[in-house]
Amino acid sequence: MSAATSLDRRFMAAAIRLGRRHLGRTAPNPSVGALVVANGPDGPRVVGRGVTALGGRPHAEPQALAEAGAAARGATLYVTLEPCSHHGRTPPCTDAITAAGITRVVVALGDPDPRVAGHGFAVLRGAGIEVVEGVEAEAAREGLAGHLSRVVRGRPWVLLKLAVSADRMLGRRDEANVAVTGRIARARAQVMRAEADAVLVGIGTAAIDDPELTVRLPGMTSSSPVRIVLDGAARLSPRSRLARSALDVPVRLLVGERAEGERRRVLAALGVDIVPIPEGEDGRIDPEAALARLAADGIGTLMVEGGAEVARSLVGRGLVDEIALFDGDVHIGTGGLPLPPEIEAALRPAAGRFAIVGRESVGPDRLTLHRRLDPPGF
């Protein structure tokens, strides 16, 4: 197998950065980055760039090849995920690569999708194209985790976002919109929301906070994800911000199979997508079934923003892959809603469940990113 060079790693790092541009906006396809690099009189230079288009089509490779034009002949293609080799809504990317005259393809990750799964590499090699695999694979895995999780595990990659006060409170009981972090931290969380395919809250949070769950950062309003409410009895108010804006930004209500029909009909008339989910033995929506349904509908990355009961349930069942914990300096005091002890315990290093993979200051507050150790299938 051909070996990667230091130059290959540099160009792949650039392709990975490019692929992150459309995170959260290409479902059901992953956001892939591609670069065409040709040798010129002054050395290698980028002659074509592509990132999966909004909505998932066209793919990154044909866009990069189209920009390169004739300069693609004899050039190297750097792409973050194995090129597709099957006919779908568009022709196979392997056909476009071969027709363009590319002589070398450098790839970060193979695609576990059974329609591709090594066949893309085989087609390229069969056409006489040199293929180099696994370049900067770990770095690429972060941006492609949603796709990998959806295909391999049949559920989205789940990011749980929590904000806690200095006295480890999530807010106040039965009180809406208690800010425990500042403006910069909230903006950072909005960026995370924009990079997710969907954002989920429980009906308790939806009822108390009446959130809109859109991206409100200047210039990024079109990046709002699908908004999902876990609402077994279909209790979401038709007067809520979510219901009233369902025709502008999709809202999906995950309800129990026994949820009252009239409530479902009223919300559906407002544009809310009602999705029945099987219930567990406790009579509540089965979280595994809910995640499986979201994956089947093309959701690869899911950001969970509330509330405490939903967070406790998902962490307890081993269904959370990352926890973004924002720490503020605000003190809540009496009447506060504490961070569930099960989550505190899961985050302790001695538990061996999560590892700290990043820390950053966000204004006067702090963000710590915890990632699950050895998530199944990865």
Image: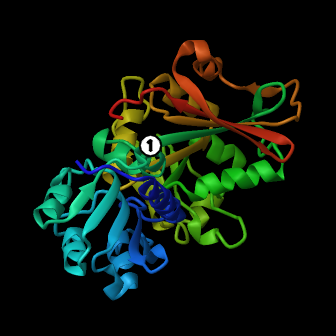
Residue 262 visible in rendering:
no
Q: Locate residue 305 relative to residue 70 in the image: left or right.
A: right
Mark 1 residue type: Glu
Residue at 20 percent across and 56 percent down: it is 121
Q: Quadrant of residue 89?
A: bottom left
In percent of width and height, residue 34 lies at 40, 67
Q: Residue furthest front?
A: 41
Residue at 41 percent across and 28 percent down: it is 283
Asked whether 114 or 312 is in front, the reply is 114
Label 1 belongs to which residue? 138
Establish if 190 lies above or below 203. below
For label 1, the crowd category at 10 Å Cα-Cα, with few meaning under 14, some 14 to 19 and many 20 or more, is: few
Q: Quadrant of residue 343?
A: top right
Q: Residue furthest bottom?
A: 70
Q: Locate residue 89 relative to residue 160 in the image: left or right.
A: left
In percent of width and height, residue 256 lies at 40, 40
Q: Colour scheme used in the picture?
A: rainbow
